[in-house]
Amino acid sequence: MNSSFSGAACPLEAGVDEERVSLAHGEGARASRRLLTEFILPRLQGARTSMLPFSPGGTGSAPTLQIRDAAELMTHHPQLAFCTDSHTITPLFFPGGDLGTLSVYGTVNDLAVAGAVPIWLSLSLILEEGLPLSVLGRILDSCASSAAECGVQIVTGDTKVVPRGAVDAIFLNTSGIGEFRSPPLPGPTAIQPGDQILVSGDVGRHGTAVLSERNGLQWSAEFGSDCGSVYPAVQALRRAVPGGIRCMRDATRGGVSAVLHEWAMECEQTLNIRESEVPVCDVVRGACELFGIDPLYLANEGTFLAVVQADVAATALTALRECPQGRNATCIGEVQPRGICPVTVTRGYGKARPLDEPTGAPLPRIC
Amino acid sequence: MNSSFSGAACPLEAGVDEERVSLAHGEGARASRRLLTEFILPRLQGARTSMLPFSPGGTGSAPTLQIRDAAELMTHHPQLAFCTDSHTITPLFFPGGDLGTLSVYGTVNDLAVAGAVPIWLSLSLILEEGLPLSVLGRILDSCASSAAECGVQIVTGDTKVVPRGAVDAIFLNTSGIGEFRSPPLPGPTAIQPGDQILVSGDVGRHGTAVLSERNGLQWSAEFGSDCGSVYPAVQALRRAVPGGIRCMRDATRGGVSAVLHEWAMECEQTLNIRESEVPVCDVVRGACELFGIDPLYLANEGTFLAVVQADVAATALTALRECPQGRNATCIGEVQPRGICPVTVTRGYGKARPLDEPTGAPLPRIC
């Protein structure tokens, strides 16, 4: 895919390689300004005009993406959510997504599972000298299209260029602000025995997609990362059972296991899941056998866990399954009074056994 | 300086080098959680309890720094400022500051010169495998102390660890939210002929401090970067001449020259400065002669420019000079109707000549 930056407006200067990022692009002077105004902003501003199905609306103003140091925002909701994530994934492009989509969806998802409506994002680029502008362009285009899909606005940003070798190609940071238009969720400390544990879709696809790309494995053309927005499914769930949700969390680094362990620590109950109920697609199952990995530890980028009260679990599942992103949603387990282990898994017809919390590093730079 | 992490609470796991960051610290599981709860959070939470002279107060709630994906904030001001900056400086420690102070002050300053009261920060760490924990500890301590000094709260964060060679030691991103408690400034498009250009202090110290450290030069013990908060001086200026300020900007990458060029582009006037009025300390003057650099192009990290109406310039200067950070404030020039050049400089008794906008890369990784 070629960058559209082959036209008249050249963001570079005499003596600079016209197809690559150079140190001059990070110096705050003319080359920086031209990269920003002629290459970066035109790509990102497109995102602001798109209207897509899952736009959260936004009572906020629509600030213009500016060169200024800070964006001016207007909110009518006094309670806000604020989060940040740096993204260092390798490879930059993988089946189902790339660094740009991951950065936008990741922060949108953090806001969504906190119970907020995602509204504004910042985007900070750290670029390695020599990065092809075509690569930067593809990633920015992905940021713009995924922001448009989510109805969020990229309102402020920053660009740094570091010499060759000081960073591997490109890292992005996205920070996000969301509005709490309904009260925040009670959180994991409210989890009670009897509560049901739901997952919004099949697990392990992001980790498998990245691992496969790194190892040169090709699966069917349809297979890819679950990288995407959980906001529509979260909204559907909240509308269906407004008072019945204890907490939600997207199962990113460390996968389902990491989320369950964090929740178990906070609520001081035991979370038990049934392996047979955890949805896993055939490709992920095959890859896990090949690599000797449990899908419960694999990263996801568009799949979340929720703990709901038992009496609303069926309604919650129905609502989730009506969303395209939630059609594989299932109830994977339930909360029990605290036993010896914080998290247990029942495999096959066996007894519940401890689900270990991984301490190793199965997949660095997964997000 | 040793990290205080030599006590009982060890954030590391068996088989992991206890004095260095390892890949396991970035995996979202137990080692990650222990690094966060036992090493990072204790350092940052200290910042929340400090009360210092220039605390902007904050009508916001005081959210606890959590492991959650997003912080919950409460504001009573509907108009907000939002900004982001990634920091890639090398060396990590330099006379007058380090990566931690730079990251906090940089974002506080972006909010302050936008006319907002800095309130909340996010802090995202990208760590290289093998980074000594003592280095991380010093930088986090600096983040905490400078946040406390500025009265801002670090409310959310993120930690990524990448394999050796994928990043040079440690990069930080800070994003910030501020409240507009008085109307935002008119901005550079409001600049008119006759307006006066003020600088809040002597220029070029940050660039000189970093350049000297890289080259093994030692100046007097008192000399250091201007790295610090401009918020108190900005507040003094706004109180003194509330309706008379057109715009403000901290003169970071690209120095005074870069700010003047951006403003000149936006207002379509000519900005003329008098070289003899630009405050430059002896060390910076000496270093500039040695390296053949003009201090107008050198980065600052605690010095800002302001354009004010002519009739309030004297009052504005007096107010600035009463602040410790503004005692070297001067009026360095004035706005003229647009001539051939966007920015001109009068050197000695000569005629005004164009001040070039630099296109090169005199100092990569300066911030």
Image: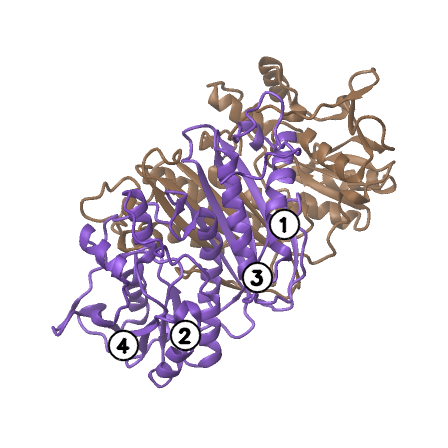
Chain colours: A brown, B purple
Q: Position of residue B140 (x, y in %)?
A: 53, 45
Q: Position of residue B317 (x, y in %)?
A: 37, 78
Name the mark on residue B87.
Answer: none
Amino acid under disc 2: Leu
In the picture, which quadrant includes the N terminus of chain A? top left
Name the mark on residue B320.
Answer: 2
Amino acid under disc 3: Gly
Q: Earlier in the sequence, mark 1 or mark 2?
A: 1
Mark 3, other Cα within 10 Å: few <14 / some 14–19 / many ≥20:
many
- Foreground label between 4 and 2: 2
Per the image, the residue denoted by label 1 is: B45
Per the image, the residue denoted by label 4 is: B334
Farthest front residue in view: B221
Between B91 and A321, the one lying in front of the other is: B91
Left or right: B244 as drawn, with respect to A365: left
The chain that hosts pointer 3 is B
Q: CA distance from mark 4 to mark 2?
A: 18 Å
Amino acid under disc 1: Gln
- Foreground label between 4 and 1: 1
Q: Earlier in the sequence, mark 2 or mark 3?
A: 3
Q: Are marks 4 and 2 on the same chain?
A: yes
Q: CA distance from mark 2 to mark 3?
A: 20 Å
Q: Earlier in the sequence, mark 4 or mark 1?
A: 1
Per the image, the residue denoted by label 3 is: B151
Left or right: B72 as drawn, with respect to B344: right
